[in-house]
Amino acid sequence: MTPLRHAPVQNVGHAPLLPVGDCFSLPGVVLSYAQSEQIYAEGDRAHFLYALVAGAVRTVRHSSDGRRQVGAFYYPGDLFGLEVDEQHAFTAEAMCPAQVRSVRLGSAEDRAIAQAARRELARAHDHLAMLGRRSAEEKVASFLLELAHQGPRDHAALQMSRQDMADYLGLALETVSRVLSRFQDENLVVFSSCRDFRIIQRSRLRCLAST
Amino acid sequence: MTPLRHAPVQNVGHAPLLPVGDCFSLPGVVLSYAQSEQIYAEGDRAHFLYALVAGAVRTVRHSSDGRRQVGAFYYPGDLFGLEVDEQHAFTAEAMCPAQVRSVRLGSAEDRAIAQAARRELARAHDHLAMLGRRSAEEKVASFLLELAHQGPRDHAALQMSRQDMADYLGLALETVSRVLSRFQDENLVVFSSCRDFRIIQRSRLRCLAST
DNA sequence: CGAGGATTTGAAGATAATCAAATCCCGTGG
DNA sequence: CCACGGGATTTGATTATCTTCAAATCCTCG
């Protein structure tokens, strides 16, 4: 297999994201977090709803034997931190310097809560579809398509490490890396660096993803 | 491996379920469905919230190449059918004769909706944890524990086929069957028939599930 | 009793995990 | 500016797990 050689860099920041609802107009304090800093921990009491203003956030959960499951990745405009129980089921961490607005949960935010719950649910359902009975190729292809979908012209910057991707997709990190190399060998995508890529053959990739 | 021989039948109906909130006091019509009958289909407009009164219901989704993903199993007292979009993302089917109360979604049911959303979310998160990076043994062990948890004294009746279990756990049906046989060989559980089981060594099973 | 679907079991093959090592990349300090 | 160090990533070889294909058995129901 040819090495994963990177094409010349054309720097693409992460996409300016999204059609946002009222997430930015919520009341609440905006806090800044450094890379890898924890926003809340699994087990903490869940008193707040969080709106990501800038940066990227992941939620993770560790099982007793040390395996890690990434719950979701969040980008600006996303709401997160909503829980069913009193306690947070996942830990939330900044993937890069991030700004987060936290909103104390009260009866006034019912609408925001409902919105967050529904989005969260959609996210979870998509994630489920991704994990169940799919090959490594299919998982990685879907993941890339999903990411590139948000960005302009099939470009995207990966905010996460290979380990994060692996833990999100339910694969070993080496497997993720191998599949990415194969995709690049077959000219489906091009990586300008290991965190920046561009989709070259969207149709073939979609076919591999077979969603 | 010794055959999966069934212990004498001591019939255990499915557990009388649950501490129920206000699901039964919602307004709405109760309809009956036969086994395998569809309650709604993937793609249908989502105008109702459903409360399962009796029986069991599964939600499924098919990918283009025919693979099936089971989204969730529902038992009496559960609310289902809540969607994020206008359309249902899954198909809902009765797993046995079932009675379902359907509630037209209006502003009056906000509380029920919020409740349904949160439970659904918890369910999805647990399901995610089940699917990611776990061995077949771990998946099946967790599944059995979860089922038996609802019932009395570690008994439970499986309302679903091996195929359903497999599609829920992201495994091949043969794999599910093999793991169940092994568990029975090791006297972790006893099957009185292929749909009724009892947990014998809860602690060892929990250890295998390693949640 | 017979038929057909569901389940179990066997054997072979495929896919992904694991273990291990090489390479890349980037910030740091000389 | 460039060498150095260390984490991230890629790659290779081997192994374990799970799937697939196939066939036997069980169970239910007419």
Image (cartoon, coloured by chain):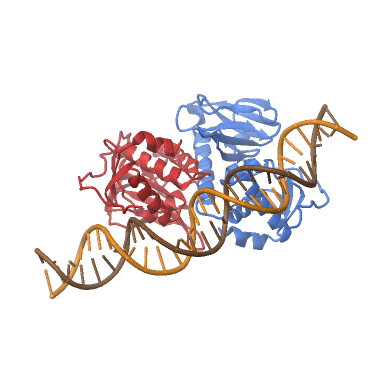
Chain colours: A red, B blue, C orange, D brown
Q: With B125 as the anchor, is A7 left or right in this view?
A: left
Q: Position of residue A87 (x, y in %)?
A: 47, 53
Q: Position of residue B150 (x, y in %)?
A: 66, 48
Position of residue B182 relative to residue B15, above or below, is: below
Q: Quadrant of residue A17?
A: top left
Q: Position of residue B19 (x, y in %)?
A: 64, 44
Q: Position of residue B161 (x, y in %)?
A: 68, 41
Position of residue B29 relative to residue B178, above or below, is: above
Residue A10 in view of the camera? yes
Q: Nearer the viewer, residue B6 or C18?
A: C18
Q: How many marks?
A: 0
Residue A49 in view of the camera? no
Q: Quadrant of residue A16?
A: top left
Q: Quadrant of residue A139?
A: top left
Residue at point 73%, 53% (across, down): B198
Q: With B53 as the anchor, is A207 left or right in this view?
A: left
Q: With B27 as the anchor, is A161 left or right in this view?
A: left
Q: Nearer the viewer, residue B159 or A194?
A: A194
